[in-house]
Structure formats: C-alpha cells, structure tokens
Image (cartoon, rainbow, N blue to C red):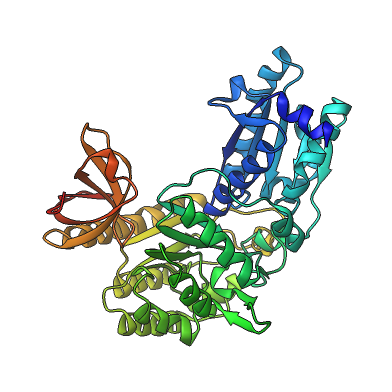
Amino acid sequence: MQETATRQAVRKKLFVRTYGCQMNVYDSERMSDMLAAVGYEAARTAEEADLVVLNTCHIREKAAEKVYSEVGRLRALKDRRPDMLIAVAGCVAQAEGEEVMRRAPAVDIVVGPQAYHRLPEMLAWAERARGGGVVDVDFRPEAKFDELPAPERPVGSSAFLTIQEGCDKFCTFCVVPYTRGAEYSRPAAAVIAEARELVQRGAREIVLLGQNVNAWCGEAPGGSTWTLARLIRALADIEGVERLRYTTSHPRDMSDDLIEAHGAIPALMPFLHLPIQAGSDRVLERMNRRHRASDYRRIVERLRAARPDIALASDFIVGFPGESERDFEQTLALVRDIGYAQAYSFKFSARPGTPAAADPLQVPPEVASERLARLQELLNNQQQVFNRGCVGMRLTVLFERPGRRPGQLVGRSPYMQAVHAEADTARIGELAEVDILAAGPNSLSGRSPTI
C-alpha cells in the first residue's frame, strides 16, 4: 500500500499513439486509465513523455512498418533521455513478440492485446531492469476484462465499448485469429455495467465493438445465454442511452433476431457496416468467407425490409490472389446492386503466416491498382449520391465537438456522416434536429430550427 502511494505521489507522463481500429482506441483508453492509477498522467507529445505506448495494428503491411519507423524516431529521443520507456502493444506485438525486440532494441515492453491488465507489473519490471526488455503475449481475454479498471475519466458524447474479441472464421487473408485469438464474448452483466458507467460519464451513444461483434453470444445475468440482439435490447433500456451502434460484423452472423432488431429498437441506428470483401463467389471461396454473394444480397434485402431507411457500409479487397477480371466485374456489379453510403477498399496486402500470402496466384500490383481506382470511383460516387440525397431532410445530430469556424459544431447523423451546424459549445453532447442544406463528399451542413 505504501509503495503504491509513493508511486502515485510522483506523477510521470504517458503518451499513447494508437494505430488501426476502434478496438485499439478503446484499448488505449483503458491502458491510460490503468496507468493513471500507478502514477502516469497524459502527455501532449512523445517528446515530453516518460513512457510511450504504441498500440499497433497488424492488418496491413504498411501499418506494421509504420510502427518500426516510429520506434526508430523514438530511439533518438531515448538516446537523449535514457530513463524514457517504450512499449509496443497491440496486434504487431502479439504477432511478432520477441521479433519486435530483435528489430527494435530500443523497445522495453512488448505486450499483446490480452495482457494489458499486466502492464503495470511489466512496467515495474522494465523500470528495474533498464535494458533487458519484457514480453507478454499470452492469450487470456477473460482475465483481461476482469482486471482492467472501469473508465474513470469523462467520456465524449459517443463512447466505444468492447464486448467481443477474437475470430473463429479464419479468412485466408486475415491475421486476427492469430493476433486476437478465438472468439470470446464478455458476460452481459459486465457489458451492461460498463455501459451504465459510460452514460454516467457523459456518453449518449454507445458503439459496441468486436472483431466479429455480431458473433457475440454471452452469459446473461440469470445464467442463460443471450444473442447480440437481446443484449442491444437491454442496453437500449438503460436511461440515458440515446443511440446504439455495433461494428464490425460478419454476414454469417446476421441472425434473424438481429435483423429484426434493426426494425424494432429505435435506439439502434439505421447504419450498418457489413463487410463482404468481394462480389465473386469464386473469390469468396478462396477467401474462406463461407458465404456466397447471393447470401449477402438476401441479408441486405431483409435488413431493408426491417428498416427501410438503413444505410450500408462495407469493406472490399481488390487484387486478391486468383482474382480475374470477371471476378472483379462481379464485385462492381454487387456494388451497383447494393448501393453503399460508405465503404473502405484496399489492394490485397499479404500478411505473413496467412494462407493467402503463400498463394502462387498473386495479382500483379499494377493490375490491382487499376482495379482499385475503378472500384473507388464507383464507391465515391455512391457516397456522394447518398449525401446529396440527405439535402432537404431533417436529421437528428449528436453534437460532438467544435467545428473549424467560431460558433460552429460538428456532430454525427444517424448515418455516421459528419454534420456541421451553427451552435454554441454548450450544446456539445446534445441531440438536435438539423435541416440539411448542403452536402459535400464526406460531410453535410445545415441549420437547426431549435437552436
């Protein structure tokens, strides 16, 4: 007890840089809360920090290389300040473990996503050892969630809440099963308790996170098992929860009750990120997606029947090994048929250790680049058409932060678009009706009749 009090008396500086998905953002916030309890407060920059944590992503090759480049920059800081500690966390840490230390000897700590709760003791060891380095990449997600502290700081009007980790799908291009482990669903009672805490700290919208979030199947308070749809119903009943979202989903886990929930639960926003990756059945099979393009189309039809105003987002990989021009044309056809409000599209990036990385039928980079440009032109056009279709509508906007101009706030529409409107900063965290007057490629602007 005395040692803890002594450590808290000397406040040190912590800087966390987050790469990748929303789950990493959530994890970074929880690591910051945990380290605050042992004497660390937030630093504005890495230059003033005693501890720098790089919370990493391993989905794409360039993301991983950015981490090593950043460690190289930090090494120059550490040469001037030998007491500074560097930690690499997240999926690069999990995937490469001791290799991180070999490639970047300036790193003091390597900690995987399931070992964040042990970060304070790892930090204490690194502070004593000074130069030895410590690695912990064990898979124990249930212990992590049991031991991470509850959020203590004020949160924004929209807050992330991780309910599920890992994936059992083993898509041939994806490293998630190897870096995050098997699917694990947090118990419903723990999720509900954290949601209540987030609302008490200012959240009006809660975004449920998981690598395969709609596979969530958790223990209910009475000992039975709930589906994600049942969990959403419970969260919607919490006083102060105005909006609910969930991401990222897999088509195979869009259950009947989850589809029905989109039409039955007003708090569940009419926007769904449902990745398909490709529109060709042949490519989907090579990806081990275990569904066909026709299955995806039927899911979309049922979602739109349940909630006619629902808008969709998706992910697409172009130039997957073995993709022919005919395969790619089938992807374009699916995009034209579905119509997306937003989408993310990438050239295939071979990740070491995945089956697709060793596939001999690699698509030439110049072919993949040309296809990506065609797909992105179509997707960008669809996004602009969707945004222009919102002009003249009155949308409910959750204001989140000040805009670039004095007297302007920026919020989110039900469809995840950024919306700019004139309003006082006192309205941050409030929901307001906004008449949409103009649309840009990535945002809307309007005027609130009630402000």
Compared with 220, 317 (above or below) is above
Q: Is residue 2 left or right of residue 371?
A: right
Residue 33 place in picture, x, y as percent: 63, 42
Residue 383 place in picture, x, y as percent: 27, 58
Q: Image quadrant of residue 344?
A: bottom left
Q: Specify whether residue 163 is in view.
A: no
Q: Please give the name of the residue rendered at 45% of the width and 69% of the height, measured from the top-left corner.
A: 274
Q: Specify whether residue 45 is in view.
A: yes
Residue 294 place in picture, x, y as percent: 43, 84
Classify the position of the N terminus by image quarter.
top right
Compared with 35, 71 (above or below) is above
Q: Please give the name of the residue rendered at 71% of the width and 15% of the height, measured from the top-left corner.
A: 81
Q: Please give the name of the residue rendered at 65% of the width and 82% of the height, measured from the top-left corner.
A: 222
Residue 20 place in picture, x, y as percent: 55, 48
Q: Nearer the viewer, residue 340 or 322?
A: 340
Q: Nearer the viewer, residue 248 or 394?
A: 394
Q: Is residue 260 left or right of residue 338?
A: right
Compared with 413, 408 (above or below) is above
Q: Image quadrant of residue 101?
A: top right
